[in-house]
Structure formats: C-alpha cells, structure tokens
Amino acid sequence: MIKSKNFFYIIFLIIFNYFLITALVFSFSYISILQGKTYDWFWVKSIQKKIYFRGLRNIWQYNKNCISYDENLLYKPKIGICEFSNPEFDSSLKFNEYTRVHETVEEIDYLKDYHVVLGDSIAMGWGVNDNETFAFQLEKLLQRKVYNMAVSSYGTVREIKKLKLSPYYKNSKTIIIQYHPNDLGENRELDINKTYTKNNFEKIFANENIKLNNFKFIFRNYKSSIRLFFSDIIDIVFRSKNLELINFDNDKKYLEKVLKENINLNEKKVIVFMAIQPWQKVINFPKNNENIEYILIELNKSHFFNIDDHPNQKGHLKIAKILNEFLSKNISDGK
C-alpha cells in the first residue's frame, strides 16, 4: 500500500514539475520575444516561433503604409520609404514606381543590357535593408545593373505581369526568378489578364487583429508549449528523417506554362532559382529546359533569421555569389 502511494506521489511530482517548468519556460520565451529577443535554444526557439507565426509577426503586405491598390496586381509597393520591423529586424525599404531602390553602384553602364529580378518576399528583401538584398549584391559583383522588381506574396503570374507593364522588359538581358512552392496556386490559375477590385484590396486587411496580451492567445500558445517539448526531443533524435519533402513536378509544369505563354524565350534568358532551408529536400528539380535554367540553392542555418523563415543579410550575400558564379560561367560575355 505504501509503495503504491509512493508511486502515485512520484508520478504527481513529475507531472506537477513538468507543468511548472513549462510555465516558466513559456513565460521566459513569451516575454523575451515581446522585447525583441530571440534564442536558438532547445524548446525556447520552438515556443517563440509558434508565438511569432500565430500572431506576433508583422506581414509586409498587410501594412497600409507600404502598399497601395492596383487594378492589375491587387497591390503594389507605395512609392517612397516603408519601415518594416519584426522582433529580429528593423528594416527600411525604398521603392520607386517599378522597383526597390538601392544605392547606385559606380562605373556601371546603365545603357547596356541589364538583369531583372522577380520573386516574392525573399527576393524583395524581407527583413533586410535596400543595400543588403541579393539583387544589390549581385549588381556589385557583376558590375551590371540589376533591377529588383520582386514583391512579397506575388506568384510568378503577377511577377511577369508587373515586369511587362514596366519599361524594363524590352531590354532586359536576363530575367532571374526566385521561385517558392507557394507560387503554385497562382500559377495553376494562370490568368494573366485578371483584374482586382478595391474590395479585393480591402480584404487583405481583414485579418484578425490578435491581441498579444489576450488570455486566449496566451493560453493557446502555452498549451502548444506542452507538446513542443516532446516534438523537439523527437526532432533531435530523428533529425535526418524529419525533412520537408518538396516534389517539384507540378511546380515545373505550371511554372513553364506561365513562362512559355508570356515570355519570348528565344529572346530572353530566364533563370529560375529556389533557395531552400536545411530541413527541406527537393525532388524532381530540373537543370534546364530550352532557354530556362534552374538553380537549386541550399542555404544553411546561419543564412536565415533565428525564428523568421527568410534569409538574413548573410543569406542574401550567399545567393548573390551563387548567381554571380552561374551568370559569369553560363551567360555570354560573363555579364
């Protein structure tokens, strides 16, 4: 009888202490991230990521100070400077009518053929300043003008539509497209002539405004913290088996359909690249097809923000160096 009581008492102590420790770790993680501090620590990082993606993260294209309505594109960057911050960064983005603006690189002949960068938030430069994007770094390396026309959350259809509505399509030498699997939905729809109403635009801002000090928000994330302890242990033990597998077959099918129907591939060189994270693996990724070249860029942990899933300054520089090496070897005259 005594042994039975001792057994249940021990179980009670284990459960009580586990919930107590969880509460302490969660409180530390929650308060820290609200103060702009993130940590690459066991359990803490997972909790902070959950809090971040469940409501703390500011989303660039939901900011009325950064975008304006556009009939053809739904939204486009506002001309001028947009301040964009999250716990891990404070960035300033400057746009003109068509591109993100960065510092002029001296000794570049702007009358020569130039390169154009298309893409979503990664290419636009989520979280980095104007002179830290891979487009700017590539321009410095190549000594040839690179126009960064990427816009957060655009799919390939709107990216090309934006390019063709601009004055930069005609004389662009190479079109560099940063691709992400979330482009597939827009590419599958493939409606280059689609238009948007102001009502469509206003719906962007209709997302729930989560209050971070709301008890429901805090309790929901605390409950997640209880499970995250075990998922982190499983991740450590089975890390090699915990890869996100991306099959590129459908992406390639619809991407090439978009490109072939909207770009003269006899006149333009198109480079499509995909930058992946360490826990991602891509299968059926092509090397090239007609005048479309494909590059898979494998980045490591140090190339990303700690909890945000976008490349940091170091990641952008790495992308620029890989693209520079490819362009120098595979594009006529090296530039």
Image (cartoon, rainbow, N blue to C red):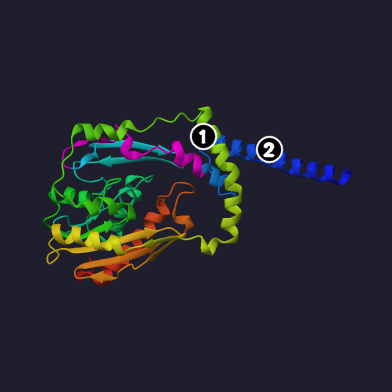
Viewer can see residue 112:
no
Queried whether the magenta region covers residue 62, the answer comes back as yes
Please tell me which residue lies in front, 214 or 250.
250
188 lies left or right of 91: left
Q: Amino acid at mark 1?
A: Leu
Mark 1 vs 2, N-terminal side: 2
According to the picture, the residue beneath numbered tag 1 turns out to be 34
Q: Quadrant of the C terminus?
A: bottom left
Q: Amino acid at mark 2?
A: Leu
Local crowd size for mark 2, using a 10 Å CA cut-off: few (<14), some (14–19), many (≥20): few
According to the picture, the residue beneath numbered tag 2 turns out to be 20
**Residue occupying image coordinates x 50% and y 27%:** 214
Residues under labels 1 and 2: Cα distance? 21 Å
Please tell me which residue lies in front, 174 or 325.
174
Please tell me which residue lies in front, 250 or 202.
250
Give SS at disc 1. helix
